[in-house]
Image (spheres, coloured by chain):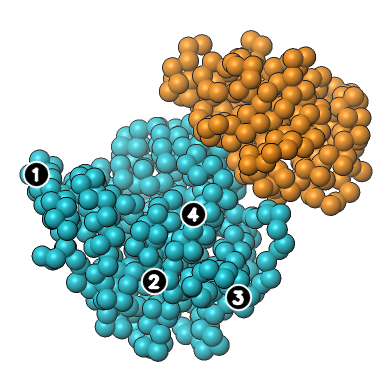
């Protein structure tokens, strides 16, 4: 049985908010489910597109870090689109989400640059820095986390938002929307450890990746323990933000 | 200036009133009042010191380095004004200066050594013109406040630009190495640059670097040789090479980051003292330096030994966890409101922790979640620091071995007040 492969994009550049916590959550939950996994780290200039990933994670970074990886990332645009078409789960978090959009206008610049184009929309400078907790509803599930961003998202008209904001900011446009989803590609402004905070999101990604390999992902007592803690943490944030279940 | 006299009188009156209403309570209110009446008061007060102002700033190590610079200068016979670390922004600094002003509203000392918050160092340095600035590091720290490390680097660059004589930079820090080089190349900056660094043996052995990486589009900086280099660290003894001359110093506590602060302090003191700098006098100064109370220290409570480990930024958390005494048998972790976005906890590797008896603080559940994914066993989660501390210590008193309490600043304040422990800031 081959291991499930997670490709972590530019962890040196895109881990400013502890986004690596998502990769840890994926590997731990696979380990707890008795499924082998391996993590490949993609760095700028390396031949990372040779990896055949099941899951691709692209975290958040400062504006300078996003600019530093952009050319390397968009240079592999064809490969990234092929992976998405092939059902590879792609998760873009904070700055990583912005790089997956059609175009990016970085703060302080006057011209937009092309993004990867896996999600429809534009990244724009925010008028005021956003730095606050967010609670949103994705389908029937509540998701939460922290948004710390100088950039906003203007979703394309034909894009599907991932969630509806209950407290906090989210994309910016259309107002009240959060993130974007297209097939197995998910982008969100919830920075850092989105997946350990929201284990349902992690499990949806893992179940899909496992099924694609003919494996069954089944959670057990170790997941239940961590998820009970996550549920308490989530309740604390909802209470602080005054969000009712 | 009449306005200054009014401001000082009003500030002192507020302080006297507060002393009656809330004895022992430190506050920035007198400074706020005085600063509002006379915004230029601080600048004029700080024209007083005959040998000028030394500003110490950066993400981490400010208090330790400030204390070291003060110690070295005093040992050389200078009179020094320094601020308490809780008074490191404008209004707090004014509050602290108020009681010390003479009839001309000046402080009568040779030099003022000021620890300044990294967000205020630019404003204050521009206001008072620092003669020497010591720039320690730019870390991924308090991003809910700074958003990006690059912004802190921008403040420190302005601080360097507002320094008249010498900018002391950490040559190991990518952002500060760049600021050092920019200052060297600048045609407008008056200041010269001094550098401190860890030696190659130490950096090769280090598991991680504490400074934030730099991803600028401009060309990489050419490394410049450092003036003071930490050659080796053995516990709380460090060997520092000062332009090739070795000096063995006793550190106030163990760790390569403390040795790095010592090298920074030595370069800052050398910049100010010039030919008066004496290696033996400096060695003596380090010998008599106290530890920073309330931070990393060992305390006996009810006959039981408790190590307090103070931690703030992800980088300092990691340093402290890596240094943790492996004889620690009982561990309590308290993460307060100051880790506002708990995402930062995921930048740290917690897997070396033994079982944790209790996780506490405003962010207790998020901290417990972090530990769950490093498979660190947690016995209990109790967000109320007072209850958690009492239960933890009660449990310890009936057992052998010693305990470790890891806390962030906010949890530290609650806990120490509750335990009636000596508190460095009051």
Q: Distance between the residues labelled 3 and 1?
A: 52 Å
Going from N to C along the chain, the mark reached first, 3 or 1, is 1
Label 3 chain ID:
B
Q: Which chain carries label 1?
A: B
Looking at the rendered structure, the secondary structure element under dot 2 is: strand
Front-lying residue, B399 or A207: A207
Q: In which quarter of the image is residue B266?
A: bottom left
Q: Name the residue under label 1.
A: B17
Q: Position of residue B164 (x, y in %)?
A: 43, 71
Quadrant of image for the N terminus of chain B = bottom left
- Foreground mark, 2 or 1, reads 2
Could you tell me residue B186's position as x and y percent? 58, 69
Q: What residue is pinned by disc 2?
A: B131
Q: State the residue position of label 4.
A: B155
In the image, which is nearer the foreground, mark 4 or mark 1? Answer: 4
In this image, B300 relative to B226: left or right? Answer: left
Q: Please give the name of the residue rendered at 26% of the width and 72% of the height, measured from the top-left corner.
A: B49
Q: Which of marks 4 and 1 is nearer the N terminus?
A: 1
The verdict on a common chain for dots 4 and 2 is yes
- The picture's colour for chain A is orange
Camera-near label (3 vs 2) is: 2
The local secondary structure at tag 1 comes to helix
Give the chain ID for the cyan colour. B
Query: Disc 4, disc 1: CB below 8 Å?
Result: no
Q: Residue B199 carries which label?
A: 3
């Amino acid at each position: 049985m081959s291991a499930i492969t997670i490709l972590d994009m530019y962890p040196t550049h895109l881990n400013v908010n502890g986004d690596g916590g998502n990769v840890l959550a994926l590997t731990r939950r696979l380990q707890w489910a008795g499924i082998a996994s391996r993590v490949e780290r993609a760095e700028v200039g390396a031949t990372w597109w040779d990896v055949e990933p099941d899951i691709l994670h692209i975290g958040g970074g400062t504006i300078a870090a996003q600019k530093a990886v952009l050319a390397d990332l968009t240079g592999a645009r064809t490969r990234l689109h092929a992976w998405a078409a092939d059902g590879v789960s792609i998760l873009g978090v904070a700055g990583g989400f912005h790089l997956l959009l059609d175009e990016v206008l970085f703060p302080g610049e006057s011209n937009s640059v092309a993004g990867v184009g896996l999600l429809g929309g534009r990244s724009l400078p925010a008028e005021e820095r956003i730095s606050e907790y967010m609670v949103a509803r994705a389908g029937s599930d509540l998701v939460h986390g922290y948004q710390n961003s100088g950039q906003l998202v203007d979703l394309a008209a034909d894009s599907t938002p991932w969630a509806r904001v209950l407290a906090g900011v989210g994309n910016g446009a259309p107002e009240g929307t959060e993130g974007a989803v297209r097939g197995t590609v998910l982008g969100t402004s919830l920075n850092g450890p989105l997946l350990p905070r929201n284990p349902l999101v992690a499990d949806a990604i893992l179940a899909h990746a496992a099924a694609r390999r003919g494996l069954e992902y089944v959670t057990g007592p170790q997941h239940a323990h961590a998820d009970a803690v996550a549920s308490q943490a989530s309740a604390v944030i909802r209470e602080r933000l005054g969000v009712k279940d | 200036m009449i306005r200054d006299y009014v401001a000082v009188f009003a500030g002192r009156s507020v302080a006297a009133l507060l002393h009656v209403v809330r004895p022992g309570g430190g506050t920035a209110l007198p400074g706020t009042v005085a600063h509002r009446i006379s915004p230029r008061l601080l600048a004029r007060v700080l024209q007083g010191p005959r040998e000028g102002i030394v500003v110490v700033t950066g993400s981490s190590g400010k208090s330790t380095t400030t204390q070291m610079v003060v110690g070295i200068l005093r040992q050389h016979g200078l009179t020094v004004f320094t601020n308490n670390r809780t008074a490191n922004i404008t209004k707090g600094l004014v509050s602290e200066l108020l009681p010390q002003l003479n009839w001309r509203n000046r402080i009568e000392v040779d030099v003022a050594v000021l620890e300044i918050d990294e967000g205020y160092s630019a404003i204050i340095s521009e206001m008072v013109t620092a003669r020497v600035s010591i720039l320690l590091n730019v870390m991924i720290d308090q991003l809910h406040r700074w958003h990006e490390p690059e912004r802190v680097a921008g403040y420190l660059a302005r601080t360097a630009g507002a320094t008249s004589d010498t900018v002391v930079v950490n040559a190991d820090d990518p952002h500060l190495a760049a600021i050092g080089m920019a200052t060297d190349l600048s045609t407008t900056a008056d200041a010269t640059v001094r550098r401190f660094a860890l030696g190659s043996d130490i950096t090769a052995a280090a598991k991680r670097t504490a400074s934030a990486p730099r991803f600028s589009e401009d060309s990489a900086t050419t490394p410049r040789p450092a003036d003071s280099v930490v050659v080796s660290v053995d516990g709380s003894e460090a060997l520092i090479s000062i332009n090739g001359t070795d000096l063995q110093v006793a550190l106030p506590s163990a760790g390569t980051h403390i040795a790095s602060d010592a090298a920074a302090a030595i370069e800052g003191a050398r910049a100010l003292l010039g030919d008066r700098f004496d290696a033996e006098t400096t060695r003596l100064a380090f010998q008599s330096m106290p530890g920073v109370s309330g931070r990393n220290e060992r305390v006996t409570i009810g006959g039981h030994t408790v190590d307090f480990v103070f931690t703030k930024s992800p980088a300092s958390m990691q340093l402290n966890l890596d240094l943790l005494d492996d004889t620690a048998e009982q561990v309590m972790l308290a993460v307060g409101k100051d880790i506002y976005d708990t995402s930062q906890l995921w930048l740290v590797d917690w897997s070396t922790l033994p079982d944790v008896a209790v996780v506490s603080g405003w962010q207790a559940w998020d901290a417990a979640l972090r530990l769950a994914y490093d498979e660190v066993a947690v016995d209990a989660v109790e967000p109320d620091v007072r209850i958690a501390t009492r239960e933890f210590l009660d449990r310890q008193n009936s057992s052998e071995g010693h305990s470790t309490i890891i806390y962030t600043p906010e949890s530290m304040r609650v806990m120490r007040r509750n335990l009636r422990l000596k508190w460095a800031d009051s």
